[in-house]
Amino acid sequence: MVLDLGLPDIDVQALIGRIRELSPVPIVVLSSRGDEAAKVMALDAGADDYVTKPVDAAQLMARLGAALRHRLQT
């Protein structure tokens, strides 16, 4: 799953926590925010990776593949 921190009217941290309660699906956060606090918040909430925009499609696919492999190992 790819989540954007810029979703309107949604607390992404709470959303990540809720997804984690329901599913082991890999979560990669995609955001234009590159500050450390945003990265730490998303990762602490349960995201598997954090990618800042703009991002190359091949890099995003590689990160999604890595997150999926890690989730399948657990």
Image (cartoon, grey):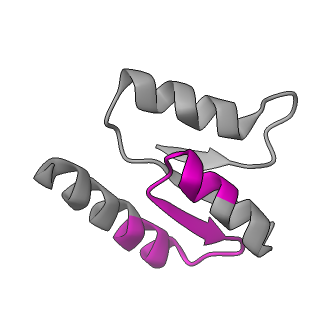
Task: Give the residue displayed 46% in from the left and 48% down from the top.
Answer: 27
Q: Is residue 20 left or right of residue 25?
A: right
Q: Quick check: 13 above or below 66? A: above
**Residues rendered magenta in the picture:** 41-63
State yes or no: residue 60 in magenta.
Answer: yes
Q: Is residue 65 left or right of residue 46?
A: left
State yes or no: residue 47 in magenta.
Answer: yes
Q: Quick check: 1 above or below 19? A: below
Number of callouts: 0
Task: Give the residue displayed 77% in from the left and 33% down from the top.
Answer: 11
Task: Give the residue displayed 48% in from the left and 69% down from the top.
Answer: 60
Asked if residue 35 shows in the view, the reply is yes
Task: Give the residue displayed 71% in from the left and 75% down from the top.
Answer: 54
Q: Furthest-left residue in view?
A: 73
Asked if residue 32 shows in the view, the reply is no
**Residue 7 at x, y percent in the picture:** 79, 39
**Residue 39 at x, y percent in the picture:** 67, 65
**Residue 35 at x, y percent in the picture:** 80, 73
Q: Furthest-top residue in view?
A: 22
Q: Quick check: 15 above or below 46? A: above
Q: Furthest-right residue in view?
A: 9
Q: Is residue 71 left or right of residue 13?
A: left
Q: Quick check: 55 above or below 71? A: below
61 vs 42, nearest the viewer: 42
**Residue 6 at x, y percent in the picture:** 81, 47
Q: Quadrant of residue 55?
A: bottom right
